[in-house]
Structures are given as structure tokens and as C-alpha cells.
Amino acid sequence: MTTAVQSGGAGGDGALNRSSSSGLAEVVDTILDKGLVIDAYVRVSLVGIELLTIDARIVVASVDTYLRFAEAVNRLDLTESGHSKGLPEFLEGAQEGGAEKKVKGAAKGAIKAAGDTVGDLVNGGRERRRAD
Amino acid sequence: MSGGWYVYGIVGRDVEVLPETRGIGEPPAKVEVIPCGDVAALVSEIDLDQPIGRTADLMAHKQLLDITVLDAPVVPVRFGAVLDSRDAVTKELLEPHHDEFSAALRELEDERQYVLHARYVEEPLMREVLAADPAAAELAGRIRSRPEDSTRDIRLQLGEAVNAAVEQRRRADTEAVVAAVTPVTIATAVREPTNEIDAAHVAMLVTTERESELERVLSGLADQWDGRMIVRLTGPMAPYDFVVRTGPTSS
């Protein structure tokens, strides 16, 4: 099984972690919150999602946040300088990237465009959001 | 079984799905294309008595769209859209919005989304914050080796100061990402942080021929920030963050 996905010209040894698919939290954030909303569609029952969404959203500063930050500062004073504690969950996601790339490479081609839809296109009209 | 037609996204009419392609549900449902004029809907017939939203369903929805966008433009539909019948997909979704979808797909030709997610490394972040804020450093000294319950007020005060400093850094670092990628992207959309020590979370729409340039720019940033934060780039994926309704439905 080979992968058809190139990781671009940037080289694989840099600090940038490349990943072709997202972890669950990122998936939830992406497909429940973004994308086209159809006017009159049936909402089928969704299991487990509310909870996950809420988990992904607890970032608004609260007393808990403050206490965690204070604790992080306190830990800092107690640790030997230098070696920093990583972010296991976040790193795991990044490391999965390699394996997931293969999956995608294998799955690629499940869908194909039978022909080119449009050659030239008028590139105007649609408003594009640009963050300032 | 009461059936429904689950919609993943909108594609051009000449997109074909291999017969073995599977989507959401247990067992995973067959994925079909319902064409209408120049556009088509990617759908699965599902059993409405069976709840959806399991991890596998979420993953399947996103994977299908992300694989599709490797070969053809796609307008992603938000997870959970189901119509009554095959006929409703045509009559209620595709026909009334045909021109809108068609125009969007033309614009999205050769464009894909990436998401940059950067998170601070806790220890250097805290050192950085204390070094820049003597008042916070002083508070940190006052809680050291003292029991938690006797220092709660000081802890809250310290935590609040740290939080403000982190938010300020997040704003600056997010702006730096946006500024760095703007020359090589079509559009950017800043996402909400998903963690209190997130440094930047930015979705970017880029044409396929500039993808390697984008990656070079971001590699440069990541190298520059190495040790200070962990930077992850995900993609290519369908343009989830760049699909916006332009107005109320005309009917």
C-alpha cells in the first residue's frame, strides 16, 4: 500500500506537524459548526454530540481556567528548568498523521470527476471572508 | 424502517462515486449521487430509527468530503442534514439552489482548505508571561509552597493575569499567522480557540498550485516558534469554513 499524498516541498523534519486528517475534536468543530445549512431539513437524533461540542468549547475564561493557570505557574517554580512537559493529546493527534495519510492515500480515488466541469470561470461575486 | 436521505455535500454533476464507497451509519451506508442540471448531491439512504452522530458517523462524513475535494470541488453541508425522499433532494434542495450551487462550485474549482492549529507549550509560555509581568511574578512567589486553600484569592488574581497575557499573545500570534499566509491564500477565517493555551486556530482557502508555498510559509513560522508552541497543519480538506449562505432562500 503506497500513499499518493505528498507532503509538499517543505521537508518533513521541521517543526510543522503535517496531518491529512483531523482528530475527533477538530472534526466536531468542523462539521457541526461549519458548512452549508439546508433550510428545511430533518434533524435526525444525534447521539453524543452535544456533550462533545460542549467539551470542545470550554475555553471561555472562568474561575477554573484561572486556577489551572495559577497551578501551571506554581508547577513552573517547582520544576527543574529546561525540560518542558509536552501536550500528549495534541501530539498524539499530530503523530497519527503519518498513518492517516496512508489511509487517505488508499482511499483516494473513491470518487472521481469524470470530466472537467468548467474551464474558465468568472471569479467574482462571492464574498470571501478575510480575517483582518 | 423509516428512511431518509442524508446529504453530505454538493458537487458537480459529473462526479462519480465508486460502488464500494461508504458513508455514515452502521453498517456504513452506500453513497450515491443525485444529479440535477449541472450539480449533484452526495447522499446516503439511511434508517431514521437509528441515531446518527457516533464518532464513526462524524468521521465518515468528513472523510467522504475530504476525499472528494482531492478530485473535484465540493460544497460541504453541515452534519445532520436529512431529507424525506430522493425526490425531496432534487425538488427541495438542488432545483431551488441550482444556480447558487453551480456558481459556488465554479469558484471553488482547484481550491482546498487547510487548518492551522497552534498550541503553546505550557512551561515556556508561563515563563514568558512571568518574565513580562513582574506583578504576576510577585504573585507567583506568594503562592509558592503554600497550601492551596489559603492562597485561593491570590491564585485567582494570578490566574486572571496569566489568562489576560495568554489572550493577548494569542491575538498577536493569530494576527501573525494571518499576515504571513494572506499573500498565498484566497481567504482566511479565524476559528475560536479550542483550548485555553491555544496560540492560533486559522482556516485557510488556497488554490492547489499555491499549496506548497503555503506549507513553506507555515514551516517557516513553525520553525521560528519551535519550542514555544506546537504547530499542526491539517489538510487538504473540503472548504468547510468558507461556505456561507448569501441570503434567504428565494422560493
Image (tube, rainbow, N blue to C red):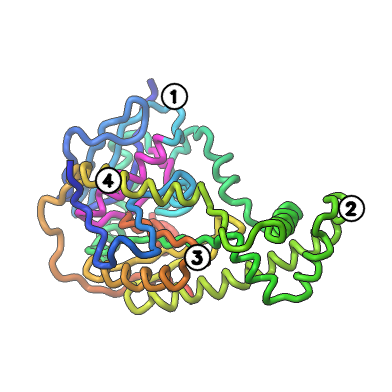
Q: Which residue is mark 3?
A: B227
- Please, what secondary structure does the residue beneath circle 3 have? loop
Marks 1 and 4, how far apart at CA: 23 Å
Which-is-in-front pick, marks 3 and 4?
3
Do callouts 4 and 2 mark residues in contact (Cβ within 8 Å)? no
Q: Quadrant of the N terminus of chain B?
A: top left
Judged from this view, the residue extending furthest toward the right is B150
Amino acid type at image mark 1: Asp
Marks 3 and 4, how far apart at CA: 45 Å
Amino acid type at image mark 4: Ala
Q: Nearer the viewer, residue B172 or B148?
A: B148
Marks 3 and 1, how far apart at CA: 50 Å
- Decide whether residue B73 is among the magenta residues: yes
Q: Which residue is at 37% across, 56% downward? A: B234
Name the side, left or right, on which B184 lies relative to B79: left
Q: Residues within 10 Å of mark 3 (few under 14, many from 20)?
A: some
Q: Nearer the viewer, residue A92 or A47?
A: A92
- Please, what secondary structure does the residue beneath circle 1 have? loop
Same chain under badges 1 and 4? The reply is yes
> What is the x, y in percent for residue B216?
31, 71
Q: Which residue is mark 4?
A: B41
> What is the x, y in percent for residue B233?
38, 60
Marks 3 and 2, how far apart at CA: 34 Å
Which label is found at residue B150?
A: 2
Q: Chain of mark 1?
A: B
> What is the x, y in percent for residue B9?
32, 48
Q: Which residue is at 72% across, 55% downward? A: A71
Q: Which residue is mark 1?
A: B49
Q: Chain of mark 3?
A: B
Same chain under badges 3 and 2? The reply is yes
Q: Which residue is at 68% across, 74% downward? A: B131
* Residue range corresponding to the magenta coloring: B56-82
